[in-house]
Image (spheres, rainbow, N blue to C red):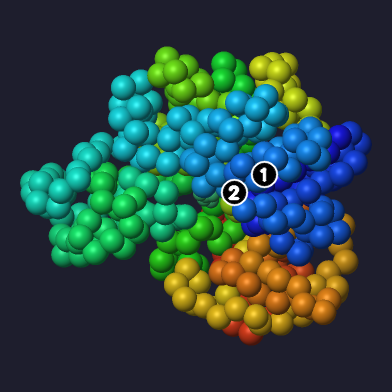
Amino acid sequence: MKVLVIGSGAREHTLVWKFAQSPKVNQIFAAPGNCGMENLAQLIQLDTNKDILRFAVSEGIDITFVGPEQPLADGIVDEFNKAGKNIIGPSKLAAEIESSKIFAKNFMKKYNIPTTKYQTFDDIVPALDYILHHPPAGGPLVIKADGLAGGKGVFICDNYTDTEIILNHLMHYDMLGKGGHKVIVEDFLEGEEASLFAFCDGNHFVSTILSQDHKQLKDGDKGSNTGGMGAYAPAIFQENLKKEIDDKIIAPTLNGMLKEDRPFIGILYAGLMITKDEPKVLEFNCRLGDPEAQVILPLLENDLVDICQAITEKKINTIELKWKNKSAVAVVLASQGYPGKYEKGKKISGIENIDDKDVLLFFSGVKCENGQYQTNGGRVVSVTAVADNLISAKEKAYTNLKNISFEGMYFRTDIAQKGIQKISSNK
Ligand code: GLY
């Protein structure tokens, strides 16, 4: 089989790596991919969704798997469907569950899917009035831009002044372009975050183990929001939590999307807050998470081709997901300055010194010149370690990443620590 993976980040590198494990796959393309994937996939530059479709048809691609949200929000799946070509991902309408936060919130309200209290605004005056009169007046509360913002559209505001500044930047100064002109003002929730993916065929789903992302830049969940600085899996919570999420969140979402005539086919990502009462949805995404994919896929025993075929043939309920009895930790090595401005072109050294089959390097912001890896983005590489338990996986990840260096290399030192603390306190 021939597989085409769309995207260029560490999530897509992980997908390429996972497809490469399948005995059914003999050729993988990545569009555009990055040079860290070159030993597994042929890289191809395709500029538009139409170009991607033309390539998939002419090359006889069997499975096209869409990594990031933007091509989905732009309707790549609709183009493939019209041409009768197989692709994994939701349609443009179904992808609105991620590409319009307002659609997602209104949808959750309509179908009683547990989420936070919220109001939507397209004008700053009523938004500020609401914030003043809604307890706790002024904060803490959460502002979310309606449109896609690459992980930069969520703001936790501690007081009225912060909120006013953010709303002004979004709604008047085009901080995120049109996507920030409409906003959601949402209650701030206490609890612990978790991520769950569901492979969906429109009618049925199978969900993965839970993982936990680390979105803030600094240790102890401090600092700016990023695309994700690391993750671990499985994230351990009380035993029946996954069933509760499946029953109260994933199943009604799939049914609701069917009723709305937007059947969800692809990967549904539920970003959750596990509150003391129940799990609540912070956000839905219409694709795998990054860096969660870097810990979920290495623990998944099933052939990804079988999962993709079951999605396409609308029989995902016949798949039983099987998991390695191990833990995985991914630590993201980032450029100094990320998620703000950063320099590129820093030489990356020491990669060749990593020689452990349970340590996987999934590249994102890299380029290669004369056989030398150089930084080319904010998040540069995810170092994933798989081991018998979370403590060993964390140790293995941090021991091995010390081999890698580049000027300004930054990483969090506490990825998976919350999970480890929980294990220790349960003993
Ligand atoms: N890890 C967050 C995301 O993929 O959106």
Residue lying at 34% horizontally and 50% vertically, measured from the top left: 179
Report crowding for label 1: few under 14, some 14 to 19, many 20 or more residues within 10 A (C-alpha): many
Residue lying at 48% horizontally and 41% vertically, measured from the top left: 73
Identify the residue at the far bottom of this view: 407
Report crowding for label 2: few under 14, some 14 to 19, many 20 or more residues within 10 A (C-alpha): few
Residue lying at 76% horizontally and 64% vertically, measured from the top left: 35
Q: Of residues 298 and 344, which is closer to you in this image?
A: 344
Q: In the image, residue 7 lies at what x, y percent?
A: 64, 51
Disc 2 and disc 1 in contact, CB within 8 angstroms: yes
Q: Is residue 420 visible?
A: no
The quadrant where residue 297 appears: top right
Residue 48 shows which numbered tag? 2
Q: Amino acid at mark 1?
A: Ile
Residue labelled 2 has its Cβ within 8 Å of some atom of ligand 1: no
Q: Of residues 253 and 280, which is closer to you in this image?
A: 253
Residue 218 vertical position relative to residue 321 in the rendered view, above or below: below
Q: In the image, residue 130 lies at what x, y percent?
A: 12, 45
39 with respect to 362 (left or right) = right
The quadrant where residue 330 appears: bottom right
Residue tagged by mark 1?
52
Residue lying at 26% horizontally and 47% vertically, measured from the top left: 183
47 with respect to 253 (left or right) = right
Local secondary structure at mark 1: helix
Label 2 to label 1: alpha-carbon separation:
6 Å
